[in-house]
Image (tube, rainbow, N blue to C red):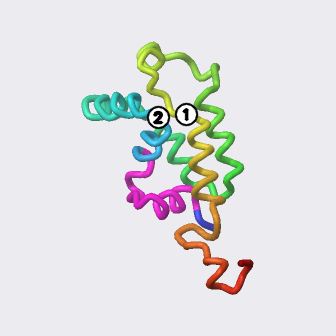
Amino acid sequence: MITFRDAYCQRTGCRPEDFERDILLACMGRPSAFCAKWIMRFQPDFFGYEYGRLRQVGNVTDQRHVYDFAAEFSDPRRGSDAVRDWLGIRPSGRTLISISLDVMTGPGPVGTVPEDPVESGGPD
């Protein structure tokens, strides 16, 4: 079976070694992603926890397991980080779920284009 990482990389053109960084930024709003890129430049392991969890979620082959990982990003027991809260630079679990639904359960196998029903003799 294809993993979430493989499906995402096929769909977006992302290199597999860039998956964690790419998906982390994709799960943030535009202003947050801008701040995150700046922070990554000066403090590369600032997002170490998120990279670890995203590395694990990249290995799932069933989209339903993404929900477990997404829930962790909003779990209040995870602790609070004043800098992240103030800047709003946390990945969105909802966005992670949305992306996984798109790349893992989209129309047809990942990397294929659905047939045109008119050309395939389907309904007019």
Q: In which quarter of the image is the C terminus?
A: bottom right
Please report the bounds of the magenta region as a residue range: 3-20
Determine the residue positioned at 64% across, 25% down. Answer: 75
Contact (CB < 8 A) between labels 1 and 2? yes
Determine the residue positioned at 72% across, 81% down. Answer: 122
Determine the residue positioned at 50% across, 39% down. Answer: 27
The residue most toward the left is 42
Q: In which quarter of the image is the N terminus?
A: bottom right
Q: In this view, does 75 lie above or below 54?
A: above
Q: Which mark is residue 28?
A: 2
Circle 2: residue type = Met
Location of residue 97 (image quadrant): top right
For the residues labelled 1 and 2, the Cα–Cα distance comes to: 6 Å
Q: Main secondary structure of the magenta part?
A: helix
Whether residue 106 sits left or right of residue 35 in the image: it is right
Q: Is residue 15 on the magenta stretch? A: yes
123 or 102: nearer the eye?
A: 123
Q: What kind of element bears circle 2?
A: loop
Q: Which mark is residue 92?
A: 1
Whether residue 22 sits left or right of residue 37 in the image: it is right
Q: Position of residue 86 (x, y in %)?
A: 44, 15
